[in-house]
Image (cartoon, rainbow, N blue to C red):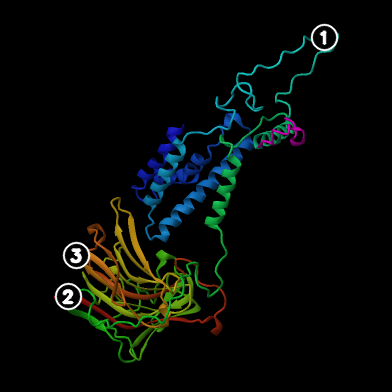
Amino acid sequence: MRLALALSGWAALLVTALPAGFPLRVVLLAAFLLLGPGAAAVRPVSPRRTDPLDALEGLVLTVAVSLALLALVAEAFYLNHAFTVPRAVGALAALTTLLTLRPRRWPPGRSGGRGAGPGRWSGAPPSAEPPPSAPPDPRLPDPPLPDPLPPDPLPPDRLPPDRPPSPQLFARRLAVRSARHRPARSPRPLVHSPAGPRVAAVGLLLLVAACGGTPAAPGSTPAVTPTPPVGPAPAAVPTDQPAAAGPWHQVFADTFEGTTLDSSRWTTCYDWNNAGCTNGGNHEQEWYLPSQVTVGGGVATLTATRRDTPGTDGGNHPWTSGMISTGRDSWDAQPRETFTYGYFAAALRIPPQGGMFPAFWLLPVTRSAPPELDVAEFPEVTRQVDMNVHWVGVFGNEETAGQSYGPVDFPAGYHVFALDWEPHALTWYVDGVQRWQQTDPQRIPSVAMELIVNLAVGYPGAAPAGPCSVSRGWPAAATAARIRSSTIS
């Protein structure tokens, strides 16, 4: 049984290679994630030794600990921008194996395991012989059947002076009294180890810590709150000259002169545009419309407004927002500009409100991701920038790696975010300074991509609640002053 439990996680890891939604994958993954890690941690007593209530309590504890461990492992990968289903399942499989194969530790006086000999609870050595009993008196009636449990030990106030109260004796007294009030039931430890209650408490506390918490107040900064920077924000460097070594040849640029968006360079939706659009894969809350994109003073402004907007997708979206892309006006149209390798830079100023999701990124012209390159993302935060790469893993699943840079007061002014995408390396820059690099060939895409700047709402968490008002700073706006793309000549 222990071997089967130890191997269950690795079986679940193998089925992650099956297509999503495949019945065998769903059943094995669900069974392992709900029961495997918790069963290895608490080791419930065999149902043959317990009554139905014991079995139910053991099952609840097992599921609670499993969910707590699952939440902690998933959160650890997510915060390091490395979460994938195979990685999370692999980590839990390794943990389950270690917990299952660890040696059992019995309490003092139980070195013989379950059903150990004399002195098991009283503390007397195993070799001690019980005192001889007097022969029964035939004149007396038959004595009552002996109590199946040993008599209560001496209370602490009657112990010898040199013998302090024992935690084991105290625990045994509680178990004996519980059993005597329910004669049809035997003493019932939930786990083999005497630390069972502690494991239960720790498991429930972990579950609360992983799944609980107080939601952020409307308009407040999300959970990650970096230390404020010392001094003013760094001045943005020009986008005209790439920070990476050249020589470079400029192939695309827009400084947003005039008062209207250049429709020869930009569209205001994704390729699935139908009188507006949204990113349903992320369960975002905005509906993108051209009216949310304005140009003036050398700046393109994307504005997110809290306003119920019915979409052509049949949904009602609580926000209306703006985006620009070098892609298509509709599904069957031709993209305006696509890029394979190059240096991409944009001078951006993000909104000061928390809960928004401004991003500068590249999406394949095939409209299937991964791969995906995130030059700069601000998922509900304003004082740190995320840089990510998404690629197809060896099992056909999506893999992700990323890095964060901060704290910086990014809403205070314009900052230049750039990516140097070359066949041998991906290098990210913030204000002309290299902040991250990836050189693994498997992670570097080689497909044509479209350039996107958007202001999403409601991802990865829900948008701030509450009515729209000036005091809350709504609407929110992200601005782009210069966007350029260059290739090595």
Query: Could you tell me how far apart the alpha carbons at marks 1 and 2 are, in whole angstroms?
Result: 109 Å
Q: Can you tell which quarter of the image residue 13 is in?
A: top left
* Image location (x, y in percent) of residue 293: 38, 83
Pick the front one: 316 or 159: 159
Mark 3 residue type: Pro
Mark 1 residue type: Asp
Residue placed under numbered mark 2 in the picture: 246
Q: Which residues are magenta?
A: 153-166
In magenta stretch: residue 161: yes
Where, quadrant-wise, is the C terminus in this rendering? bottom left
Q: Residue at x 26, y 60 (%)?
A: 443
Q: Say which mark, if any, is on residue 137.
A: 1
Q: Is residue 166 left or right of residue 261?
A: right
* Image location (x, y in percent) of residue 100: 46, 37
Mark closest to the chain's N terminus, 3 or 2: 2
Q: Say which mark, if any, is on residue 423.
A: 3
